[in-house]
Image: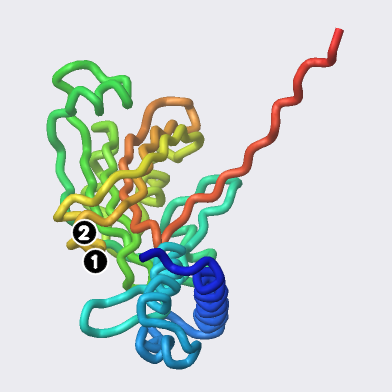
Amino acid sequence: MSEHPASASASGGRRRAIETWLRAQAGAGTEGDPLPSEAELAERFSVSRMTARQAVQVLEAEGLVRRRRGAGTFIAARPLHRRFGPLMSFTDDMRRRGLIASSRLLEADLRKATTSERAALRLDEGVRVVVVRRVRLADGVPVAIEHAVLTDDCAAVLSADLEAGSLHQALGELGRRPSSAFCRISARTATAEEARRLVLPPRAPVLVEQREIRDDDDRPLEFTTTVYAPERYVIDAAFGFERPPPAP
């Protein structure tokens, strides 16, 4: 039997009241603070547990709360926003925010370039590339997995401190300073390894950015694929509207 329209309307109003109250709690609290259980919300707002659960699910979809099976509901981490403007290295971006950037080094090697890497870096067949793969952290929290591929004249960066230090700073010391970048942004589900390293649920959505970087001399320098945990890092964009031509 379907719910009576008046009853459904009242239920929807109470659900929205729970959502509003939860948003206020999430805004006033800090990451990891516990929130009332569905049973407690149902009693507080005189609704069914199903209605309370629907309200919590809305806040979870908005990224404001996180539910842990058997543990409860908690205030989620507030994502870092990369604002529209000049592109910064991850290290410089975190420093500007007052956070400590660090890395877990997964791979640092010199190997033969793949077909896609050769195309992005404008390389001949058989040429080797420098590969640096790291988990990037902000104040110890994993934010992204970065897979950077550099031209082979940058091999000296392999001796730099790539966990506490900045790859772009190491490149600058070699005279190869990033100057311009072309980015592509997409989304997909995380692989099992990505979910484990970023501490995400299995098959969670991730944000993927591919970036081709050139140096001050407009030479190809870096081809990087970065996988972000979207609830911890957001890329903002600004666009202008194209004005239609004036009528004849």
**Relative horizontal placement of residue 215, taking residue 195 as reference (left or right):** right
Q: Distance between the residues labelled 1 and 2?
A: 6 Å
Where does the image place residue 157, in percent across and percent down from the top left? Answer: 27, 47
Within 10 Å of disc 1 (Cα), the crowding (few <14, some 14-19, many 20+) is some
Q: What color scheme is it? A: rainbow
Q: Nearer the viewer, residue 67 or 124?
A: 67
CB atoms at circles 1 and 2 under 8 Å apart? yes
The residue singled out by tag 1 in the image is 199
Q: Tag 1's secondary structure?
A: loop
- Residue that appears at 35% across and 44% down: 187
Whether residue 48 appears in this view of the structure is yes
Res. 195 mark: 2
**What residue type is disc 1 on?**
Val
- Residue that appears at 39% across and 37% down: 211
**What residue type is disc 2 on?**
Ala
Image quadrant occupied by the N terminus? bottom left
Q: Which of 98 and 216 is in front in this view?
A: 98
Res. 15 mark: none
The furthest residue to the front:
1
